[in-house]
Image (tube, rainbow, N blue to C red):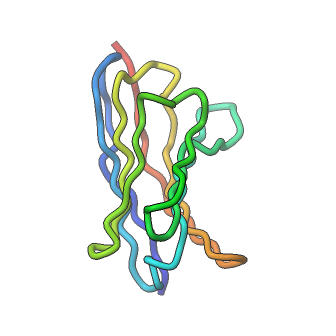
Amino acid sequence: QAQLVESGGGLVHPGEAKTLSCAASGFGFKSYAIQWHRQAPGKERELVAGISSNGNGNLLYADSVKGRFTISRDNAKNMAFLQMSSLKPDDTAVYYCKAIMGRSVYWGQGTQVTVSA
């Protein structure tokens, strides 16, 4: 059974850093592009960052996180990561990992990140 499991969320203070992980199982992870999305309370889910299946293509970032967030993947370990730095209260959201290959799409259950003093 295909599964994506995010981890690494929690409470951080403004200006701090945190890394989220996404562990994949049950499908051909290395053939899928990976995206991180987030959804803040009362807001629509938004794309944060994306990376191609081999990790060598262009990286995609939302303007709001450029220069602060870095997406990466380790196909040997079936893992993807989102390194977040200089976190702001506006970054507070549930963060989701998404795997995409054509019409085949998998979502994780999400991990909460709260940025608060």
Q: Position of residue 22 (x, y in %)?
A: 38, 60
In the picture, which quadrant includes the C terminus?
top left
Residue 51 position within the rendered picture, expressed as x and y whole percent measured from the top left: 50, 57
Q: Quadrant of residue 43?
A: top right
Vertical side of 48 occupied by 114: above or below: above
Q: Nearer the viewer, residue 109 or 68?
A: 68
77 displayed left or right of 105:
left
In the foreground, 61 or 44: 61
Residue shown at the point (52%, 49%) measured from the top left: 59
Q: Quadrant of residue 88?
A: top left
* Residue 41 image point, x, y percent: 61, 32
Where 81 falls versus 26 (above or below)? above
Residue closest to the eye, 62 or 105? 62
Q: Residue at x 41, y 36 (%)?
A: 113
The outermost residue toward the top is 117
Residue at image location 32% in from the left, 17% down from the top: 15
Q: Is residue 30 above or below residue 23?
A: below
Is residue 92 rendered to the left or right of residue 86? right
Residue in front for this viewpoint, 21 or 49: 49
